[in-house]
Amino acid sequence: MKSPRLLTLAFGFILALGSLRAADPAAAWRAADDARIAAMVSADAKQLDVVFSDDLLYVHSNGKPDTKATFIPAITSGKSVYRSVTYEQRDFREVAPGLVHMTGRCRVQLGKTAPYNELYLSVLAAYRLEKGVWRFLAWQSAKLTEPVPAKK
């Protein structure tokens, strides 16, 4: 069983890291994305509220859009169950002061019971610096086919 106190401390630590403007700004951006994934997997409404921007636009790989007001209830009610997100590639680029784009390829495991649905996705996300904290602003994903191994 997950300890709510431990989760709160972990999220606080990750958000604190995410708000730093260190010599390696990508570390803060990775920390913000890691906090977002942890909040989605834990389905903790308070943490989702902290890591999601009020202006969130989340477009799923099937084209269905969600906002902060619709996505948090979908996650916390169990309608959308995120089990894990594993990146194959994740890159960040500051496109303007306080605005970061993340591109990547990842595997997202979804579902309440096994066998879980696993999606292989290409993603574009945005994070915005809001009151000193990097918050998840936007997501757009597209399903990818599995890479075919090269013939020897």
Image (cartoon, rainbow, N blue to C red):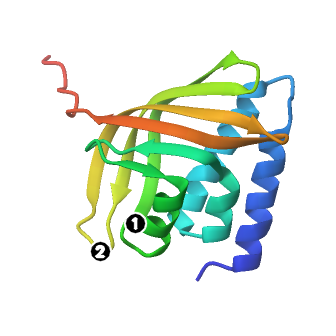
Q: Residue furthest bottom?
A: 1
Relative to 151, residue 82 above or below: below
Q: Give me the residue at 75% from left, 35% from top.
A: 129
Q: Nearer the viewer, residue 137 or 27?
A: 137
Looking at the rendered structure, the secondary structure element under dot 2 is loop
Identified by mark 1, the residue type is: Val
The count of marks equals 2
- 121, 147: nearer the viewer: 121
Q: Which residue matches tag 2?
A: 113
Q: How far from the left and from the top, in percent, is residue 110?
A: 34, 60
Point out residue 76 in the picture as x, y percentages from the top left corner: 49, 72
Q: Position of residue 65 (x, y in %)?
A: 37, 46
As drawn, is 69 to the left or to the right of 27? left
Marks 2,1: beta carbons within 8 A: no
Quadrant holding the C terminus: top left
Position of 150 with respect to 40 (left or right) is: left
Residue holding disc 1 = 81
Above or below, comparing residue 51 to residue 33 in the picture = below
